[in-house]
Amino acid sequence: ETGVTQTPRHLVMGMTNKKSLKCEQHLGHNAMYWYKQSAKKPLELMFVYNFKEQTENNSVPSRFSPECPNSSHLFLHLHTLQPEDSALYLCASSRSGTRGSEDTQYFGPGTRLTVL
Amino acid sequence: GNSVTQMEGPVTLSEEAFLTINCTYTATGYPSLFWYVQYPGEGLQLLLKATKADDKGSNKGFEATYRKETTSFHLEKGSVQVSDSAVYFCALFGSGGGADGLTFGKGTHLIIQP
């Protein structure tokens, strides 16, 4: 599935750096998601956007700042991260922007983030 | 809250063996249930899903049946191939409101040896 792309695929950053992760979906979907995948832990939902509006912030620290300028693009801005934030960050999209939808979520390949 | 429990891996099998990966869930209401697969270096792909009790999802020889009475959604395949080696995630989408994202299990790493 190449409908959801993420850049960069790998990122190494220091704790004082500012970086951004980018996600783009080519599927005409209205909802986009950020998930965090850490070793030996379940995937954790971070943020949900429906029709460019944030509908869910799952108690994510403020050092992670999402941005959704349109239905096709989603960013995750990173600032003063901690080593424990090192993980695979996955973006996903689904067709419907309606809250509570059961539509299938399509995932990108992820960005492997390492915080030194 | 919602939660998903699946068997810990890695699970190592020989080619053509029968596969079962157990998954049980806790949720309010009547969630939809999913199996996703993650091949090395790739994102998650939907493998199959079931949206109501007794539904059977199937794809690529894999099957799973939504069992409300046992709150389970075990993944099975009759004859595995080396190409099935991947990490398999059981997930649910709750119907009781709250987050629109999926709740995942920890994943089961499956290794198929020739």
Image (cartoon, rainbow, N blue to C red):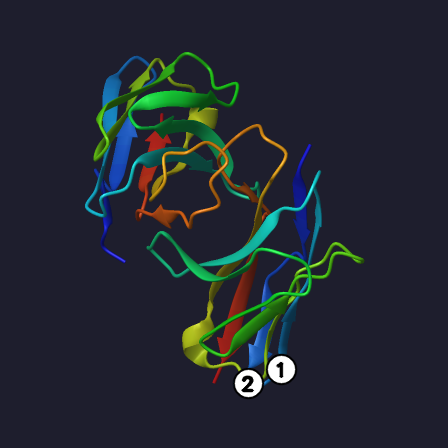
* Towards the viewer: B12 or B103: B103
Which residue type does callout 1 highlight? Phe
Say if labels 1 and 2 share a chain. yes
**Within-10-Å neighbours for mark 1: few <14, some 14–19, many 20+:** few
The part of the image, by quadrant, that contains residue B21 is: bottom right
Judging by the rendered image, the residue that carries numbered circle 2 is B79
Judged from the image, the secondary structure of the residue bearing numbered disc 2 is loop
Point out the image quarter for the N terminus of chain B.
Answer: top right
Q: Give the tally of numbered discs.
A: 2
Mark 1 or mark 2: which comes first in sequence?
Answer: 1
Q: Pointers 1 and 2 in contact (CB under 8 A)? A: yes
On the rendered structure, is B30 left or right of B77? right
* Rendered position, A19 above or below B85: above
> Which residue is at a point 35% across and 13% down the rendered structure image?
A80
Q: Residue at x 75, y 54 (%)?
A: B71
Give how far apart the Cα atoms at labels 1 and 2 are.
5 Å
Q: Which residue is mark 1?
A: B18
The chain containing the residue under callout 1 comes to B
Image check: A73 left or right of B2? left
Residue at x 80% of width, y 57% of height: B69
- Furthest-right residue in view? B69
- Which residue is situated farthest in the bottom direction here? B16
Say what amino acid the circle numbered 2 marks.
Ser
Residue A81 position (above or below residue B49): above
Q: Where in the figure is residue A57, as x and y percent of width and height?
A: 46, 20
In this picture, is B48 found above or below B96?
Answer: below
Say which of B38 and B54 sits in front.
B54
What secondary structure is found at the residue carrying circle 1? loop
Quadrant hosting residue B13: bottom right
The location of residue B114, given as percent across then percent down, is 47, 85
Q: Nearer the viewer, residue B14 or A103?
A: A103
